[in-house]
Structure formats: C-alpha cells, structure tokens
C-alpha cells in the first residue's frame, strides 16, 4: 500500500562549493540521497543519473523482498548507465556517487546503501545510525585503530572504498530490511550534514517534534552555521504521526532537479529554530574521492601507522619537555629559597636558618645555617615566643642583626 506519513527534502550548495553535486528524492514510497563526486560536472551527472534511475521505484510493493530486489536492480542499472555515459563523454571519467535509498513497504523499511551518505533512525528519543560508511576511516574504526571522534577529523576521512561509479558494473551494495512503526523519523543525508552537525545536535533537532520541512530547515541551518564546507542534502521521513500524510508529486532536490544535471541554484536558506554551538573544526571539508585498489588501501594503512607513530613520538617528546620544564622550574624555585633566611629555634637555642619557613610534604625547604649559642631560657617570654614562631630576614646580614638584638636583650654573646 502507499506509505502513510510525511516527508521533506532539501539541498544546498553550502558555503564553499561552487556547485551542488548532491541529489535527493522524497516521493510516496521511495526516499533517497546521492552525493556525487568527480569534478565540477561529473558529480552532478552521477548523482542525477542515480536518482533518475531510482525514481521508477516509487510505487507500492507486494513484499519487502520484491522491493529489495528492485533496489538492487535499479542501482546496478545506474552503474551500467554511468559506464555508458563515460564511454560517450570521456571527460566525465572517474565520476561516481553515493546512494542511500529507502523504500517503505507496509510496516517495513527496505534499505540499499553504498558510500558515505547516511540513514539514521530517530525512535523513542534515540538517534541510531543505520548504515555503515564505506570509507577508509570507518575501516580503521571497525578495526579499533581509531575512535569515531578521531574519524571525524582524520585527514583521509573523504576516501571512499565503495561507491557507485563508472568502473564497476556490479557494485557491492548493503541491503537490508528493518521494521518501522508510527512515530519513527528516518533521516537520509549526505556527509555535508553528518560531517558538520554531530549526532547530539541532530537528535535534538529531530526531537523537537516539528514537521519534516521545518526540521530539515533547522538541520540545514545548523550545517550552514557550522561552515557548510560541502553540499548539504537532507531527506526526512516521518512514519504516521500528527503531520499531514504525503500527497502530490515527489520532491526532487539538488542536481537531479535540473534537467541537465549541472549548475543547480542554491536551495532556500534555513528558517526557524535558534542557532546551536558546533565543533570548531569542520569534518567534511575535503572533496570526496574513490580509491578501491587494495594496494592503495595498504598504503593508507601504512600511512596511518606512520602518523600514529609520529603522534606517539610527539606525545613522548611533549611529556619529556614538560617534565624537563617542571624540573627546571623546581630547581630555580629551590635555588631562590636558598637566598632567603629566617631566625628560629631548635630544641634549646636560637638558630639562623637558610631557606623559607615552609615544607612540601616531607621535603623541608630550610636547613640550619648557624647555631647562635643563645639559650632560649635566657630570652624574655615574649622574645622566646617570637623566635619559636620564627622571624623572617631579608638577607643573612639582616638575620645576624636580629640575632645581635637578641644578644643585647639576653645580656650574652653568640657562640
């Protein structure tokens, strides 16, 4: 049956790119995002061709297996069309596109995915990434070599290992079927959104309960506020819910909305919702490119090992330098304390001490310099109490002057 729910699609060139190589589609049963690559025109053409090929799938299906098979066939046909296009237009060689598509069949979502665009599910106030990025850094994350946060800023984060391109007529797709339910929000997006707006901010926007169009605008505004170094495409799908069900024609955005697939005007700017803070560094700031060769992967892994070694060496050197500076500071501080003097007492006599009247744990910052030989018992009660509390001196001569005054008051001489 026809999907019961509501949807929205929006695409924007961003603040850095000169053209929009993304494409998006929101129909009655089909929803898709494609992020093209391969130069000024190649990416536009690739994503447009992929969406055009998928568009024929936008109708009800009798079963999920039928929908899954249709997705696989359509994406394979798109790959063949890319190869034919490059044969006719050699200047487009190397073009390719990601594809993340979702077909609603009754209470199920049928998903097909290749590349680093993403599909998220927001359910019960929790955001879950459903697809897995087909990138070099994701392989590093999966192998435990780096963390997901490190992957966001890795210098090779834009290297795709699987993509719909002009070199493989049988692309390796991820396809699977998931149950869905009323209240679910499905988000399909290019890395222009996921690389700039982190998951907590995305979840917050999805959790505000606004209609799909306003929610998509909010997410786009966050990407623009974060610098939007790449094209941003968002397709949002609500299952059931309070908002009007889908009606009318499909919404096509990005380069696929342009008949020639090139030079798409910038989409509407975001509206509604206040601005939120974003990471100081933007993650999606390098052109995406495809490197499928195994030897290249090995080269990247070795490069990452070298980078990790440099980081460890840099960290060790930094720690050693910090410890050296700390030790030097402590030595200088101790040397300064040894230029100070004070007058105090030992068990039974007046003593000139070198250092200061403080200790650092078990470490004393003063040592006896001269036992004056003046018995404490010869001092007045007030003078004795003052000495026992210690008297600071600005120099050794000042300390000796203090002792001389005590000698006069005690009526005796120093030993």
Image (tube, helix red, strand yellow):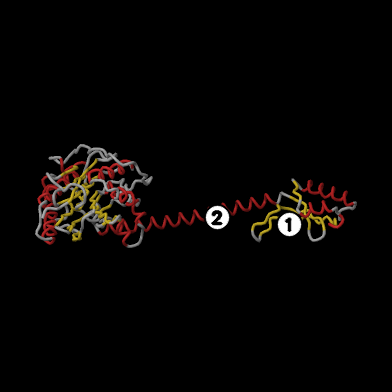
Q: Give the residue at x 63% y 53%.
A: 331
Within 10 Å of disc 2 (Cα), the crowding (few <14, some 14-19, many 20+) is: few
Q: Badges 2 and 1: C-beta atoms under 8 Å apart?
A: no
The vertical placement of 143 against 239, above or below, is below
Q: Position of residue 352 (x, y in %)?
A: 78, 53
The vertical placement of 254 against 373, above or below, is above
| Residue receiving disc 1 | 367
Q: Is residue 61 visible?
A: yes
* Image quarter in which the C terminus is found: bottom right
Mark 2 or 1 closer to N-term?
2
Residue farthest to the right?
Answer: 411
Q: Is residue 91 visible?
A: no
Q: Tag 1, which secondary structure?
A: strand
The numbered disc on residue 381 is: none
Q: Is residue 349 left or right of residue 272?
A: right
Within 10 Å of disc 1 (Cα), the crowding (few <14, some 14-19, many 20+) is: some
Q: Of circles 2 and 1, which is in front?
A: 1
Quarter-of-image position of residue 144: bottom left
Q: Give the residue at x 12% y 40%.
A: 259
Q: Give the residue at x 75% y 47%.
A: 393
Seen from the viewer's position, the closer of residues 279 and 318 is 279
Q: How many marks?
A: 2
Q: Position of residue 196 (x, y in %)?
A: 32, 47
Seen from the viewer's position, the closer of residues 23 and 237 is 237
Q: Position of residue 368 (x, y in %)?
A: 76, 57
Residue farthest to the front?
Answer: 242
Q: Tag 2, which secondary structure?
A: helix
| Residue receiving disc 2 | 323
Quarter-of-image position of residue 220: top left
Q: Is residue 366 left or right of residue 175?
A: right
Q: CA distance from mark 2 to mark 1?
A: 27 Å
């Amino acid at each position: 049956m026809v999907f019961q729910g509501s949807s929205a699609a929006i695409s924007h060139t961003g603040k850095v790119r000169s053209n929009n190589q993304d494409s998006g589609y929101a129909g009655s049963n089909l929803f898709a995002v494609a992020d093209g690559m391969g130069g000024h025109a190649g990416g536009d053409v690739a994503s447009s061709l992929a969406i055009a090929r998928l568009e024929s799938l936008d109708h009800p299906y009798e079963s999920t297996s039928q929908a899954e098979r249709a997705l696989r066939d359509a994406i394979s046909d798109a790959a063949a069309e890319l190869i034919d296009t490059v044969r006719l237009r050699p200047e487009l060689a190397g073009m390719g596109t990601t594809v993340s598509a979702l077909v609603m069949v009754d209470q199920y979502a049928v998903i097909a995915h290749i590349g680093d665009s993403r599909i998220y599910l927001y359910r019960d106030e929790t955001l879950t990434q459903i697809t897995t990025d087909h990138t070099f850094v994701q392989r590093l994350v999966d192998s435990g070599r780096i963390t997901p946060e490190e992957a966001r800023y890795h210098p090779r984060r834009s290297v795709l290992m699987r993509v719909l391109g002009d070199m493989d007529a049988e692309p390796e797709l991820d396809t699977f079927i998931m149950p869905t339910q009323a209240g679910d929000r499905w988000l399909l997006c290019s890395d222009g959104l996921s690389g700039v707006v982190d998951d907590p901010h995305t979840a917050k926007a999805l959790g505000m309960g606004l209609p799909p169009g306003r929610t998509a605008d909010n997410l786009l505004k966050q990407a623009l506020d974060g610098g939007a170094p790449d094209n941003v495409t968002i397709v949002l799908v609500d299952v059931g819910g309070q908002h009007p069900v889908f009606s009318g024609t499909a919404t096509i955005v990005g380069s696929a909305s342009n008949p020639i697939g090139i030079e798409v005007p910038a989409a509407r700017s975001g509206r509604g919702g206040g601005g939120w803070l974003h990471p100081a560094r933007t993650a999606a700031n390098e052109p995406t490119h495809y490197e499928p060769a195994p030897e290249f992967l090995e080269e990247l892994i070795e490069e990452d090992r070298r980078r990790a070694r440099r980081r460890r060496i840099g960290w060790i050197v930094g720690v050693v330098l910090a410890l050296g500076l700390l030790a030097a500071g402590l030595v200088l501080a101790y040397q300064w304390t040894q230029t100070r003097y004070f007058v105090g007492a030992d068990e039974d006599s007046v003593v000139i001490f070198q250092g200061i009247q403080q200790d650092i744990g078990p470490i004393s910052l003063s040592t006896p310099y001269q036992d004056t030989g003046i018995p404490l018992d010869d001092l007045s009660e007030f003078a004795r109490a003052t000495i026992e509390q210690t008297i600071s001196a600005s120099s050794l001569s000042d300390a000796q002057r203090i002792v001389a005054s005590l000698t006069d008051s005690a009526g005796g001489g120093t030993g």
